[in-house]
Amino acid sequence: MPSVIYLDNNATTAVDPLVLEAMLPYLKEFYGNPSSMHSFGGQVGKALSQAREQVAALLGCEPSEILFTSCGSEGNNTAIRAALAAQPEKRHIITTQVEHASVLNPCKHLEKQGYHVTYLSVDEQGCLDLLELEAALTGDTALVTLMAANNETGVLFPIEQVGSLAHDYGAIVHVDAVQAVGKIPLDLHQLPVDLLTLSGHKLHAPKGIGALYVRRGFRFRPLLIGGHQEKGRRAGTENVPGIVALGKAAELAQTYLGDPHEQQLRDALEIGLLQRIPDTQVNGHLLHRLPNTTNLGFKFVEGEAILFWLNKYGICASSGSACTSGSLEPSHVLRAMHLPYTVLHGSIRFSLSRFTQAAEVERVLEVLPGIISHLRAISPFSHEEEDWLQQQERELVLR
C-alpha cells in the first residue's frame, strides 16, 4: 500500500503514466511553435490536431468544436462572456446556488454591471427543481449556466432537460462539466448544450490545460484577443505538452467509461462507514451522482478535525465545510441543501479514481471509526445537539 492514500480526486488527479509518456517528447525534442512555417513546428501542429480529435471523441462532438484553454476557470469565464456577447440585448442570467466559484463570482460581478441573475435553489438531496427553472426563464434570459456534476456531492444535474427548456426561450446553455468529463458518458451530438467546459487535471492530465466546447455555428467572441491561435478564438501560444497530455487523457478516459471499479470501491467505503459509525449520513442524492464521489456527514464533530486526524494516517480527503484561509464558513453547497448544522460542520468528501485500491479503502474503514469516536468523546457538543445547533446559528448570524 502506498504511504499516501489519495481520496481527493475531485480536487485534482495523479497524472497517468501513459499521459506523462505522451507529453514528454513535447517538452524535450518537439518544442517547436505550432504556428511556425517550418516543418519542425509543423510536426507539433499535427500533434495538436490529434489531441483535438481525441478530446472531441470523448465528448461526442467535432474536433473543430474544441477550443483549448488553460483551465476550467478560464473556460467558464470565457463561456459566460461569449454567451453574453452573442446576445448583448439580453440582461438576464440563470445559474444555481451550488456552482463553483468560477461561475458564481463572474455572475456576481456581472450583477454589478447591471445584469439580473437568478440563482436556482436545490433540495435537501442537492437536486434541481425544473419547475423553478421554467418559471425563471423569460425572453430576456441570455444564458443558463450550470454544472453537470457538483464538485462536493457529485450530484448530477439534468442538463438535457435544462438545455431543452432554455433553448425554448432562446437562451444559450453553458455547462461546467469539469467534474463530469471522463466519469460519465457525454454525447454533445445529442445534448442541447452550446458551450461546455472541462479541465485536464480532473481526468489524469496535468494542471494548466483545459478545453471549451463551442457548438458549431455559435457566434463566439474571444476573451483573450491577440494572435490567431485556435482559429482566432483564444490568443496565445499553445501549451503543446499540456494539449498532447489532455488528448491522451481523454483517450484513456474513454476506455475506462463504464468500468465499475470506482463505484464499487466508493460503495464499499460508504456502506462500511455507515455501518461502523452511528449518526452518519450521505449528503446528496444516492442514485443521481458521480460514481467516484461520496460526501458523508458525521454529526457532532468538526470536519477540519477529521481531516487533521486522517492526514496523520496519510489519508487525503476534503472537508465539505470548504474552509479557506482559516475561515470556518460552512460549504455553500451543503448550506443550499438546508442540511442541519450538526451535519454541515462534520462533512467530508471522499473522491476516488481508477488508481484507488481496495486496500486503501479498507485502511480508511479501519481508522476512521476510531477517529470519529475519539473526536466525539472530547467534543463539548456530543449529545447536546440543540445547544450545539443554537451556538452555530448564533455564530453564523454574527458573521
Image: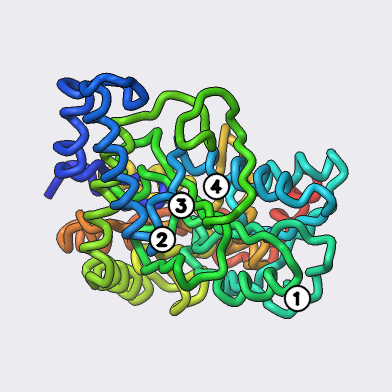
- In front of the other: 394 or 86: 86
Disc 3 is placed on an element classified as helix
| Within-10-Å neighbours for mark 4: few <14, some 14–19, many 20+ | many
Mark 2: which amino acid?
Cys
Image vertical order of residue 221 relative to residue 250, above or below: above
Which numbered disc flags the more N-terminal residue, 1 or 4?
1
Q: Are marks 2 and 4 in contact (CB under 8 Å)?
A: no
Disc 1 is placed on an element classified as helix
In percent of width and height, residue 90 lies at 82, 54
In percent of width and height, residue 151 lies at 49, 56
Q: Are marks 4 and 3 in contact (CB under 8 Å)?
A: no
Which one is closest to the eye, mark 1 or mark 2?
Answer: 2
Question: Does the rendering let one see residue 176?
Answer: no
- In front of the other: 231 or 346: 231
Q: Tell me the distance, in whole angstroms, between the alpha carbons under discs 4 and 3.
A: 34 Å
Q: Which residue is mark 1?
A: 134
Question: Does the rendering let one see residue 51?
Answer: yes
In percent of width and height, residue 150 lies at 52, 60
| Quadrant housing residue 28 | top left
Q: Residue at x 42, y 50 (%)?
A: 64
Mark 3: which amino acid?
Glu
Q: Which residue is mark 4?
A: 322
Q: Tell me the distance, in whole angstroms, between the alpha carbons under discs 3 and 2.
A: 7 Å
Which numbered disc flags the more N-terminal residue, 4 or 3?
3
| Within-10-Å neighbours for mark 2: few <14, some 14–19, many 20+ | many
| Quadrant housing residue 133 | bottom right
Q: Which mark identifies residue 65?
A: 3
Q: Which residue is mark 2?
A: 61
